[in-house]
Each structure stands twice: as structure tokens, then as C-alpha cells.
Image (cartoon, rainbow, N blue to C red):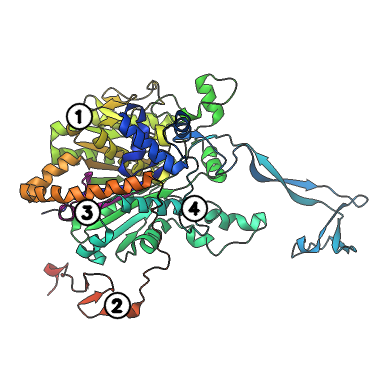
Amino acid sequence: MSNLPVIVGFGGINPAGRSSVHHAYHRMVIDSLDAPTRDRTFASLAALMQQLDSCTDEARQFMLEHTLIRRLETNLFDADAIHLHKRAALKGTSSRPVRFTTRRYDLPDNIPASWQIKTNDDASVEVTIPGDLDVLFNDTRCSRVLAAGQLPTNFEPEKLYQSRNHPRGLQLTVYAASDMLNSLGISWDEVKKRVPADQISVYASSAMGQLDANGSGGLLQAGLIGKRVSSKNLPLGLAEMTADFVNAYILGNVGTTGANIGACATFLYNLRQGIQDIRSGKFRAVLVGASEAPLTPDVIEGYRTMGALAEDEALKKIDGVTQGESDHRRACRPFAENCGFTLSEASQFIVLFDDELALELGANIYGAVADVLINADGFKKSIPGPGIGNYIAVGKSMGVVRAILGEESLKHRSYVQAHGTSTPQNRITESRIFNELAKSFGLTQWPVAAIKAYVGHSLACASADQLIASIGVWHQSIIPGILTSTAVADDVHQSHLDFILQHREIDAEAMDSVFINSKGFGGNNATAAILAPHVVNRMLTKKHGRNKLKQHRRKNETVREKIAAYDDAMLAGENSVIYNFGVGVIEGEALGITAEQISIPGQKINISLTPDNPYEDMTD
């Protein structure tokens, strides 16, 4: 029988807050929550944002204003005074040469032949240049993009562990993976007692690598700004470090690992690897994640010059504002009159078990991944331009749900978490894809949501943000509305669609599936079909029987208690970040090696070296 990839845990951080126990999702729908849930949401934000009191009106207003999309704050960089160098040429003549005084130490190592050097009494030197001198003046500029999806104000991941100048994306990785493991409600040691080390896999990456000064940004800029390259710049700048840090410093994993990159569909690319592992039966536990920290002046300017980001002047033009600033909170407006997407930072991780392991350990069941479909665009006019691949990915994922749950479930008990970037091109192309396929499959009013309206576009992590918000919908029975979009734009295709512009309360058990859609630069299209927890429970009952499910429910009580205890500790301000630098290192000499197996100290189950012959029908 096939193995079902069950979602048993999740955690992370994005502009809405901490993901575990649905806190980030609750921030999106906070006005629709009951008082106790709202209080815990504020308490979670207060712990992140170093607010001493989460109950006062003043504190709560601060937390509301300093989460989600908002004006760029100065903790990352000053958007009103971005440092740069401006080139200039100082003109000299034979009668009036260019002349300046400096320290000999500050002279270039290779002094041009035309320079005349005179040493002064104070050990300085006077330089005379008869011709021209090219110089770089220190200068500043204002960013034309002033809105971003920033992590909650005062959240400082680098102070939660010995970060040693790690790039911000890796700091977020350490926090997010720790949050995921701590909120699992099951000790990872307990997992390792039941799963051989080579049957655990980790797939995670960023899309762009680590581009701040501690990563590739520092590597490429150092020589141009008079600094030296650090020994950490190059290795820590690699995109696969997201997975490597989890393996080396959080799990101590020796199983399969990988870092798939697919632009904005990166998380779904990694998720596909994870579910294939579990379906194959060769792996029983998989961690899938993504991290992205692209809020640097250079990255923002790069996307802006492509015409991809919402600039302040364009936002004001849409709103008819002639003075003052644009409405930064509403910078991202999926499927409405819009002018570009809003860049964001985030890190998210999920845990997948095969269905038998999930039942055996009493794990929480948040849903299951039916499939992830990936299709390229074919021939393209331009790399960033959309193509036909997303039609195929969305259509095949709809076909998967129809095959598993039936036509009526697809038609009346499914919805879409759209890529929904807030660009004029996306609102037309993505809506046409959904509309045409809904028409072809016989759907009349297919609900469409788009959470980038709240948290922006975190690139590699975007589909993970969508997935974790969708898990929250089944918990709280509220689909977040596209509140920043007051009306659907005239050029959006919607004859068979129902764009959710306001929060919508639903019967969670009447929503069987959600489609997580992602469209990336270069033709990287992916769509995940996610099955609801009540559907998964029904499937597991059919496969394993009612008695096995009853046993699971009894074990799950303890798991839920542990999750609640972790959440209480986090609300109280406890630091639970896991970072095992240099801890538990095992050298090769400590392994027990035979021709049949390898034993690892501390691992209860040995690794077998006697697999079945996969080509038995082709060999003697």
C-alpha cells in the first residue's frame, strides 16, 4: 500500500510573527478572533517584539503597526539614506595639478607612474597629479521602494544564539527550524529510536543565497569598499546552507539532504522531493523548508529596475495622492489595481511523516500532501515573463484531487491560495489560468485567496507562507481576505472565480483541499494539492482501521500537551533556539562497520548495507 506524506509539524517566522501554533496566521485574521485567541496572539507578538506588556492598548497598537507589510524600518538599513559611491573626475592641468595630502598607508599598493609623492615631516605624504584623477565620492540616495514585508520590529534572531556573524537568512533558518522541532510535541530522539538515520531527509534552501554583508554580498563588495573578504563570506553565502545548517547544527542528520532551487517556487520544489521520499517507502521522516532574507538595498534596487516592485510614486498615482507618502500597509494588492510586488523576508519549515509513523507516535495531523506538480514554460519571450507551464501544474493538481476525493469535492470543497504577487501581469495571467481551468473542470465560483497582501513576497519561502496559512484555515475556519484590495481589477478573469476580499468564515470540515500555487521567474511553476486533516483521518481510518486511530488519539493527547507547554514557554519569553555547534560530533573511527551494516554511537537502529536488488528482473 502507498505511504501518505502527512504534515505533522510546522514552524517559522515571517512578518506576521511566529508560525507555530498558528500565531502568524492568527495575526492575519486578528480582528475576527475570539478574545482568548486574540490575547494569545498578542502575547506571542509581545515575546518576539520585546514588549513587556501585551495587554495595554498602546502596546497592542504598536504590535499591529510594526508587523506585516509596512514602511521600511531602520533596523535593516535607512531607506532614506542608502550609502553609495558616486563617480567623478577631478580635472588637473600642468599649471594647476590635482594635489592632496594623505597617510602613506592609505596610498594604493600600485602607485600610478604619473603621481609625484613628497613625504612631509608629520609622516604624511603630499600627492601631485598633473592629469585627471578618477574618484568615488561617498553619497546617499533615497529608495524609491519604501514598503516591505519585515519581521516584527525588535525581533533579533542574531541574539538568540551564538550567530557568529551568520547571514540573516541563516539566522532565520536556525530560529524557524528550532520552532518547528520544539512545536512538534515529540522529541526528535524519540523519532530516531524508530527511524534509521538513513531514512530521514532534509530539503531546504533559499532562492537567491545569502546576499547581505555576511554572505555573498560581502564577498562581492569587500574589495570595492576597502574591506577584506571574510573566510565565511563565500561558504555561508551558498543557497544550500539552509539545509546544511539544519543537518549540522540542529538535527545532526546523516540522512539524505538537498537544496532544490526554483525561484519563487523553491519551497514547493523541495516539498516535491520530500513527498517522493515518503511515497517510495525508503524514507519515513522529512524536513522541508526555505529561508529568504532579501531586504538589502541592492536586492530591492535590482528588483525595482526590473519593474517588478511597487514604487512609492506609482502607489500614490494609483491612489490619487499628490502629497505625503503612499499607504505602505496596502502596498501589495493582489488582483486589484496594482503596480508591483512587495519584497519580504521569512523562514518556514514543515515536518512530514509517513502515515504509519504519524500514528505510531501520536503526531498532530495538520493535513497531507497529495502531490506537487512542477512544469516549465517551454519557449519564452523573456526569462521573467509568464508562460504555459502553470496551466499544466494547476490542471494536473486539480486532476489529482478529483482522482482522490471525487468531482464533487473538487467542485464544491476546494479553494486556491494564489501566488498573487500584486503585479499587473500576474493579476491577468494567474487569474486566467484559474478561470480557464475552473471552467474546464466545471467549477463555477472557485474561491481564491492571496496572503501576500499581508506578508509580501518572500521568494523561496512564499509558498511555505501560503501553506502554513492554509493549515491555519482548517484550525480556525477563517480564510484570510485580500483586505488590501478593495475591488478586483477590470482586466482580471473572474467569470468562474470568487476572489475573497474579506475574511470568510467557513465550515472547516466542508473544505477538503487547498491548492498552493507558485509562479517563478524562469518558468518555475509549481502547484501543491494539500488534503485537509479531516480527509486524512478518513483515509487513515480506511487504511489502518478504527482501533489504530483510537490508539493514535490517546497518544496524541500527550503530544498536544507538550505543544501547549512549548507555546506557554515561548509566550513567557523563553528562548528555545536549538544550535548545537561542535556538540555530538562523531568521527569515522567511532563507527561500527561490517559488510551488512553501519552502527552510529547514539543511534538505536543501525544502517543497513544490504538493500534489495532494484533491478532483479534484469539481472541473473
Vertical relation: 377 (above or below) 437: below
* Residue 468: percent from left, percent from top: 31, 41
Mark 1 and mark 3 lie on one chain; the one further toward the N terminus is: 3
Depth order, front residue of 338/169: 169
Q: Which residue is mark 3?
A: 353
Q: Which residues are magenta?
A: 349-370
Q: Which mark is residue 257?
A: none
**Mark whose residue sits in front, 4 or 3:** 4
* Kind of residue at badge 4: Lys
Q: Which mark is residue 591?
A: 2
Disc 2 from disc 3: Cα separation: 27 Å
Q: Which mark is residue 159?
A: 4
- Which residue shows up at 75% across the image and 50% down it? 135
Count neighbours of disc 1 (C-alpha within 10 A) and say few if under 14, some if 14 to 19, many if 20 or more. few
Disc 4 from disc 3: Cα separation: 32 Å
* Kind of residue at badge 3: Phe
